[in-house]
Amino acid sequence: MLESYTPAMGRAGIIATAVFASLLLIAVGVDFRAKHPSVPSGIESRDCLKPTPPDESPYDRFARQGGRITRYPNAQWQDNSYTVADIAQGRNLNKYDKLELRDRVHLHPWEWHNPILAQARSFLWEHWRSRSRAYLVLTLSSVDHTGTSHMFVEPDDSGHWRVYSRQLDRHELVDEPTVYSVVWVIPNGWNAPGNPLPAGQAPDPIKDEIEFRDVCGEQDGTL
Protein backbone atom coordinates (compact mmCIF):
# COMPACT_ATOMS: atom_id res chain seq x y z
CA MET A 1 0.00 0.00 0.00
CA LEU A 2 1.45 3.39 -1.01
CA GLU A 3 2.00 5.96 1.73
CA SER A 4 0.03 9.15 1.44
CA TYR A 5 1.98 12.27 0.58
CA THR A 6 1.79 15.06 3.17
CA PRO A 7 3.00 18.68 3.14
CA ALA A 8 5.36 17.83 6.03
CA MET A 9 7.06 15.22 3.87
CA GLY A 10 7.51 17.80 1.13
CA ARG A 11 9.05 20.29 3.53
CA ALA A 12 11.42 17.64 4.87
CA GLY A 13 12.53 16.83 1.35
CA ILE A 14 13.17 20.48 0.56
CA ILE A 15 15.18 20.94 3.76
CA ALA A 16 17.23 17.81 3.10
CA THR A 17 17.95 18.97 -0.43
CA ALA A 18 18.99 22.42 0.80
CA VAL A 19 21.30 20.94 3.43
CA PHE A 20 22.89 18.63 0.87
CA ALA A 21 23.37 21.50 -1.57
CA SER A 22 24.97 23.65 1.15
CA LEU A 23 27.39 20.89 2.11
CA LEU A 24 28.25 20.35 -1.53
CA LEU A 25 28.96 24.05 -2.05
CA ILE A 26 31.18 24.12 1.05
CA ALA A 27 33.12 21.10 -0.17
CA VAL A 28 33.53 22.62 -3.62
CA GLY A 29 34.64 25.92 -2.07
CA VAL A 30 37.24 24.23 0.14
CA ASP A 31 38.58 22.28 -2.83
CA PHE A 32 38.72 25.41 -4.99
CA ARG A 33 40.59 27.39 -2.32
CA ALA A 34 43.05 24.54 -1.91
CA LYS A 35 43.77 24.56 -5.63
CA HIS A 36 43.61 28.35 -6.07
CA PRO A 37 44.97 30.00 -2.88
CA SER A 38 44.39 33.74 -2.62
CA VAL A 39 47.64 34.21 -0.66
CA PRO A 40 50.83 32.12 -0.46
CA SER A 41 51.23 29.53 2.26
CA GLY A 42 52.86 30.67 5.47
CA ILE A 43 56.61 30.28 5.95
CA GLU A 44 56.86 28.42 9.22
CA SER A 45 58.97 26.19 11.44
CA ARG A 46 58.27 22.50 10.95
CA ASP A 47 58.48 21.61 14.64
CA CYS A 48 57.60 24.08 17.38
CA LEU A 49 58.37 21.52 20.10
CA LYS A 50 61.97 21.02 19.04
CA PRO A 51 64.33 22.85 21.45
CA THR A 52 66.38 25.76 20.16
CA PRO A 53 69.97 24.63 19.45
CA PRO A 54 72.57 26.20 21.77
CA ASP A 55 74.64 29.02 20.25
CA GLU A 56 72.36 29.13 17.22
CA SER A 57 73.49 31.70 14.65
CA PRO A 58 70.99 34.23 13.24
CA TYR A 59 71.11 32.53 9.83
CA ASP A 60 70.53 29.07 11.32
CA ARG A 61 67.57 30.42 13.26
CA PHE A 62 66.18 32.01 10.09
CA ALA A 63 66.49 28.67 8.27
CA ARG A 64 64.96 26.72 11.17
CA GLN A 65 61.97 29.05 11.15
CA GLY A 66 61.47 28.32 7.45
CA GLY A 67 62.92 31.50 5.90
CA ARG A 68 63.91 31.46 2.23
CA ILE A 69 66.49 33.42 0.22
CA THR A 70 66.49 33.89 -3.55
CA ARG A 71 69.80 35.15 -4.93
CA TYR A 72 69.85 37.70 -7.74
CA PRO A 73 66.07 37.96 -8.18
CA ASN A 74 66.23 40.54 -11.03
CA ALA A 75 65.15 43.36 -8.73
CA GLN A 76 64.04 46.62 -10.33
CA TRP A 77 64.11 50.12 -8.83
CA GLN A 78 60.66 51.64 -9.37
CA ASP A 79 58.96 54.58 -7.67
CA ASN A 80 61.58 54.87 -4.90
CA SER A 81 61.60 51.20 -3.96
CA TYR A 82 62.93 47.82 -5.06
CA THR A 83 60.46 45.36 -6.51
CA VAL A 84 60.27 42.20 -8.62
CA ALA A 85 57.66 41.00 -11.09
CA ASP A 86 55.99 38.60 -8.65
CA ILE A 87 56.31 40.65 -5.47
CA ALA A 88 52.58 40.32 -4.65
CA GLN A 89 52.53 36.57 -5.40
CA GLY A 90 49.07 36.68 -6.95
CA ARG A 91 47.39 38.79 -4.27
CA ASN A 92 44.57 41.08 -5.31
CA LEU A 93 46.11 44.33 -4.10
CA ASN A 94 42.85 46.20 -4.69
CA LYS A 95 41.72 44.68 -1.37
CA TYR A 96 44.69 46.15 0.54
CA ASP A 97 45.25 49.62 1.95
CA LYS A 98 48.69 50.60 0.67
CA LEU A 99 51.33 52.88 2.15
CA GLU A 100 54.73 53.55 0.58
CA LEU A 101 57.45 55.11 2.74
CA ARG A 102 61.07 55.92 2.00
CA ASP A 103 63.77 57.10 4.37
CA ARG A 104 65.08 59.99 2.26
CA VAL A 105 67.52 61.42 4.82
CA HIS A 106 69.44 58.14 5.15
CA LEU A 107 68.78 57.60 8.83
CA HIS A 108 70.18 54.33 10.04
CA PRO A 109 67.34 51.78 10.22
CA TRP A 110 68.31 50.91 13.80
CA GLU A 111 68.17 54.49 15.06
CA TRP A 112 65.35 55.19 17.49
CA HIS A 113 63.06 58.20 17.04
CA ASN A 114 62.97 57.72 13.27
CA PRO A 115 59.72 59.34 12.03
CA ILE A 116 59.59 57.03 8.99
CA LEU A 117 59.59 53.98 11.25
CA ALA A 118 56.95 55.61 13.46
CA GLN A 119 54.65 55.97 10.44
CA ALA A 120 55.27 52.38 9.43
CA ARG A 121 54.57 51.07 12.94
CA SER A 122 51.32 53.04 13.23
CA PHE A 123 50.11 51.86 9.83
CA LEU A 124 50.84 48.19 10.53
CA TRP A 125 49.43 48.28 14.04
CA GLU A 126 46.15 49.97 13.13
CA HIS A 127 45.48 47.42 10.41
CA TRP A 128 46.55 44.50 12.59
CA ARG A 129 44.31 45.68 15.45
CA SER A 130 41.32 46.27 13.18
CA ARG A 131 41.88 43.07 11.18
CA SER A 132 42.00 44.86 7.85
CA ARG A 133 44.30 44.12 4.95
CA ALA A 134 47.32 46.36 4.46
CA TYR A 135 50.36 46.52 2.18
CA LEU A 136 53.36 48.45 3.46
CA VAL A 137 56.30 49.23 1.17
CA LEU A 138 59.13 50.51 3.37
CA THR A 139 62.48 51.51 1.88
CA LEU A 140 65.36 52.26 4.25
CA SER A 141 68.92 53.31 3.53
CA SER A 142 72.19 53.39 5.39
CA VAL A 143 75.54 54.70 4.17
CA ASP A 144 76.19 51.70 1.92
CA HIS A 145 72.91 49.82 1.56
CA THR A 146 69.31 50.37 0.46
CA GLY A 147 66.60 47.76 0.86
CA THR A 148 62.83 47.55 0.61
CA SER A 149 60.43 45.64 2.84
CA HIS A 150 57.12 44.51 1.32
CA MET A 151 54.82 43.66 4.25
CA PHE A 152 51.30 42.26 3.92
CA VAL A 153 48.80 42.29 6.80
CA GLU A 154 46.19 39.73 5.80
CA PRO A 155 44.27 36.57 6.68
CA ASP A 156 45.56 33.32 5.25
CA ASP A 157 43.14 31.01 3.47
CA SER A 158 42.24 29.43 6.82
CA GLY A 159 41.26 32.80 8.29
CA HIS A 160 44.31 33.26 10.55
CA TRP A 161 45.65 36.82 10.51
CA ARG A 162 49.35 37.26 9.85
CA VAL A 163 52.11 39.54 8.56
CA TYR A 164 53.88 38.15 5.52
CA SER A 165 57.15 39.97 4.75
CA ARG A 166 59.50 40.02 1.77
CA GLN A 167 62.81 41.91 1.98
CA LEU A 168 64.44 42.96 -1.27
CA ASP A 169 67.61 44.64 -2.48
CA ARG A 170 69.76 44.39 -5.61
CA HIS A 171 71.26 41.06 -4.66
CA GLU A 172 68.60 38.96 -2.95
CA LEU A 173 64.95 38.46 -2.11
CA VAL A 174 64.28 37.24 1.43
CA ASP A 175 60.95 35.65 2.37
CA GLU A 176 60.81 36.05 6.14
CA PRO A 177 59.17 33.57 8.54
CA THR A 178 55.48 34.46 8.69
CA VAL A 179 54.34 36.47 11.72
CA TYR A 180 51.21 35.52 13.68
CA SER A 181 51.61 37.81 16.69
CA VAL A 182 52.29 41.55 16.81
CA VAL A 183 52.98 43.30 20.14
CA TRP A 184 54.36 46.63 21.30
CA VAL A 185 57.58 46.60 23.31
CA ILE A 186 60.05 49.05 24.84
CA PRO A 187 63.39 48.76 22.97
CA ASN A 188 66.12 46.96 24.87
CA GLY A 189 69.17 47.47 22.67
CA TRP A 190 70.13 46.57 19.13
CA ASN A 191 68.88 43.16 17.97
CA ALA A 192 67.63 42.20 21.46
CA PRO A 193 64.06 41.34 22.52
CA GLY A 194 62.18 44.32 23.91
CA ASN A 195 60.37 44.65 27.22
CA PRO A 196 56.55 44.45 27.13
CA LEU A 197 54.73 47.73 27.67
CA PRO A 198 53.25 48.10 31.16
CA ALA A 199 49.56 47.24 31.33
CA GLY A 200 47.42 50.16 30.26
CA GLN A 201 50.29 52.17 28.76
CA ALA A 202 49.59 53.42 25.26
CA PRO A 203 52.41 52.80 22.76
CA ASP A 204 54.47 55.70 21.46
CA PRO A 205 55.29 54.87 17.81
CA ILE A 206 58.31 57.19 17.80
CA LYS A 207 59.93 55.57 20.86
CA ASP A 208 58.46 52.08 21.17
CA GLU A 209 58.79 49.21 18.71
CA ILE A 210 56.58 46.51 17.26
CA GLU A 211 57.84 43.01 17.96
CA PHE A 212 56.89 40.16 15.64
CA ARG A 213 56.47 36.52 16.69
CA ASP A 214 56.21 33.46 14.48
CA VAL A 215 53.81 30.52 14.60
CA CYS A 216 55.81 29.00 17.48
CA GLY A 217 55.73 32.21 19.51
CA GLU A 218 59.42 32.94 18.90
CA GLN A 219 60.55 36.51 18.46
CA ASP A 220 61.00 37.18 14.76
CA GLY A 221 62.35 40.69 14.44
CA THR A 222 61.07 44.14 15.26
CA LEU A 223 60.03 47.31 13.50
Image (tube, helix red, strand yellow):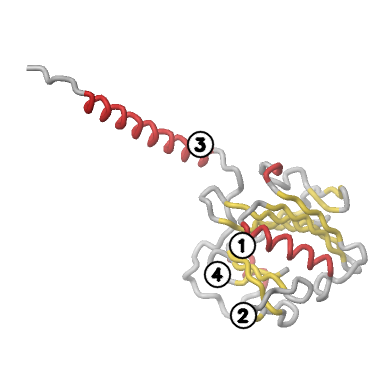
- The structure residue drawn at horizontal position 70% and vertical position 44%, both measured from the top left corner, is 93
**Left or right: 22, with 220 as reference point:** left
Mark 1: which secondary structure? loop
Foreground residue, 95 or 91?
Answer: 95
Residue of label 2: 55
Name above or below for residue 141 compared with residue 3: below
Mark 4: which secondary structure? loop
Residue of label 4: 217
- The structure residue drawn at horizontal position 63% and vertical position 81%, both measured from the top left corner, is 198
Foreground residue, 189 or 145?
Answer: 189
Alpha carbon distance from label 1 to label 2: 23 Å
Indicate which disc, 1 or 2, sits on the residue closer to the N terminus. 2
**Residue 142: x and y, percent?**
88, 68
Q: Residue type at mark 1?
A: Val
Q: Residue type at mark 3?
A: Phe
Residue of label 1: 179
Badge 4 crowding class, 10 Å Cα cut-off, few under 14, some 14 to 19, many 20 or more, is few
Residue with the most extreme left position: 1
Q: Residue type at mark 4?
A: Gly
Q: Residue 192, located in which quarter of the rendered image? A: bottom right
Indicate which disc, 3 or 4, sits on the residue closer to the N terminus. 3
Indicate which disc, 1 or 4, sits on the residue closer to the N terminus. 1
Nearer to us: label 2 or label 3: 3
- The structure residue drawn at horizontal position 69% and vertical position 70%, both measured from the top left corner, is 210
